Amino acid sequence: MNIYETDKLRDEYLLFHFGAPSQILPWPRGPQEALEFPTRIVERFSSGEVGRALDLGCAVGRSAFEMSRTAAEVVAIDYSQVFVDAGKAMQGAGCCEVSRLEEGRRRETIVVEAPAGARPERIAFEQGDAMNLRAELGSFDRVLAANLLCRLPEPARLLGRLPELVIPGGELILTTPCTWLEEFTPQDGWPQGATLPWLKGELEAHFELLEEHDEPFLIRETARKFQWTVSLLTKWRRR
């Protein structure tokens, strides 16, 4: 079974994306700087209003909500139909119940809410394959692909499509924890060395690298167990 089609991952990601900090990490000495990852990465785009934005690998949609604040149209695509349905449900209701695992078999139902000030009516969620995007998708002022590359069987296929997706002068943000695993990507699809030089080699003919830095994120599994991970964020401008 695809883990991204399970209720377990759906609820973990709804909490990761939309949970209040106190709902995710009640421990004051925990890694607070890793919270609000889907918001922080969108804030790396330049300021100002744009026409179209694309959130590739949108999961349950928090970054798409954030992009809707300054983009007249946001297309949000994920391979998981369960994730897409969860994003649509949040878009329609503005809140969602989440079954949060505490420990063992003990669960607690909580409510997470869409961010205030977002423009969910601007978002179009759809199920799709980042390696085989529909031809009529068009081009965008901003493209975000968060923690997606190392979950694709052939990440180079997406990298090869990106010049068509970003308009000249438009911006691209990629994040990846560089967790290359054979269960997602055969080894012949991995970078030959480190991920950053590989990205530069794949993209610099069409994009200018504007910045690169680390962005931590935190996913709650139980009340006492968390995934703390650090993504490499790169920001590019289309030549």
Image (cartoon, grey):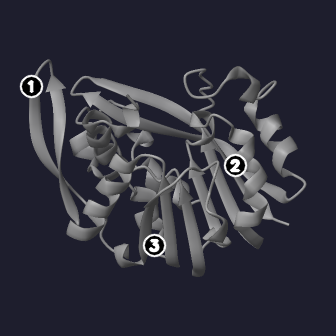
Marks 1, 2: nearer the viewer:
2
Kindly indicate whether the residue at mark 2 contacts the one at mark 1 (C-beta within 8 angstroms): no
Neighbours of disc 3 within 10 Å: few (<14), some (14-19), many (20+): many
Label 2 – label 3 distance at C-alpha: 23 Å
Which residue is drawn at the image coordinates 62% and 57% (left, top)? 133
- At horizontal 70% and vertical 65% (from top left) the residue drawn is 165
Give amino acid for label 3: Ser
Q: Amino acid at mark 1?
A: Arg
The single residue placed furthest to the top in the displayed view is 104
Task: Determine which residue is flagged by label 1.
Answer: 106
Query: How many marks do you count on the picture?
Result: 3
Q: Real-space Cα distance between discs 3 and 1?
A: 36 Å
Give neighbour class at mark 2: few <14, some 14-19, many 20+ (Cα, 10 Å). Answer: some
First in residue order: circle 3 vs circle 1: 3
Residue at 82 percent of width and 58 percent of height: 207
Point out residue 216 in the picture as x, y percentages from the top left corner.
51, 38
Q: Which mark is residue 3?
A: none
Q: Which residue is mark 3?
A: 68
Image spot of residue 140 (x, y percent): 65, 72
Instruction: Give the residue pinned by disc 2.
Output: 158
Give the residue type at disc 2.
Leu
